[in-house]
Image (spheres, helix red, strand yellow):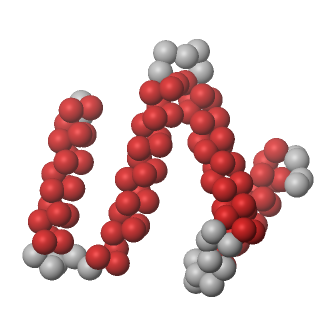
Amino acid sequence: MSHSVQDELSSMRTILQGLEARLERGEVAPEGLPEFKSVVDDIRLRVWSLLSAAGTEEPRAVAERFRLRRAAEMCRALTTELSTGAVGAGYPEWPEVQQAAARLQATIAVHTGQAA
C-alpha cells in the first residue's frame, strides 16, 4: 500500500502529539527529548535536501551532496567552537564524536582513495 505525503505528515503529527501528551502526564523522561530533537532536525535537513534536489537531473546526487556539505559545516563549527571554548570539553559525548569522526575518516579513505 502506497502512502501519500499527507499520510506521512499525519503520522508524524500523531507521533508528536502522543509524545507531548505522555510528557505532560510524566510518562516520558525529559532526558530523551534531545535525541528526539536530533532525529527531527535530521528529518528537517533531509526534507530540505529533497526539496533542493527535486526537479534536477540527478536528485539523489544533489541530496547526497547537500548532506555532505551539511556534515562538513557541522564538523567545522564543532572544531571552531571546541577550540574557542564556546563548547565545553568535559562532555561525555566527546569520545563518541571522536570515534565517529575517526571511523568516517577511515571509511572516506577506503571508499574514495583519498586519505586526509
Q: In the rendered image of this protein, does residue 104 appear above or below residue 3? A: below
The quadrant holding residue 66 is top right
54 left or right of 75?
A: left
14 left or right of 115?
A: left
Count of labels shown? 0
Residue 72 horizontal/vertical position (percent): 69, 49
Query: Which image quarter is the N terminus in?
Result: top left
State the residue at coordinates (87%, 46%): 113
State the residue at coordinates (39%, 68%): 34
State the residue at coordinates (66%, 41%): 69
State the residue at coordinates (24%, 48%): 12
Q: From where the camera sits, is residue 101 visible?
A: no
Which of the two residues, 116 or 2, is positioned nearer the viewer here? 116
Residue 51 horizontal/vertical position (percent): 45, 27
Residue 41 horizontal/vertical position (percent): 43, 52
Q: In the rendered image of this protein, does residue 116 appear above or below residue 87? A: above
Residue 37 horizontal/vertical position (percent): 38, 60
Query: Which image quarter is the C terminus in?
Result: bottom right
The quadrant holding residue 23 is bottom left
68 left or right of 42?
A: right
Q: From where the camera sits, is residue 79 visible?
A: yes
Q: In the rendered image of this protein, does residue 36 appear above or below residue 23? A: above
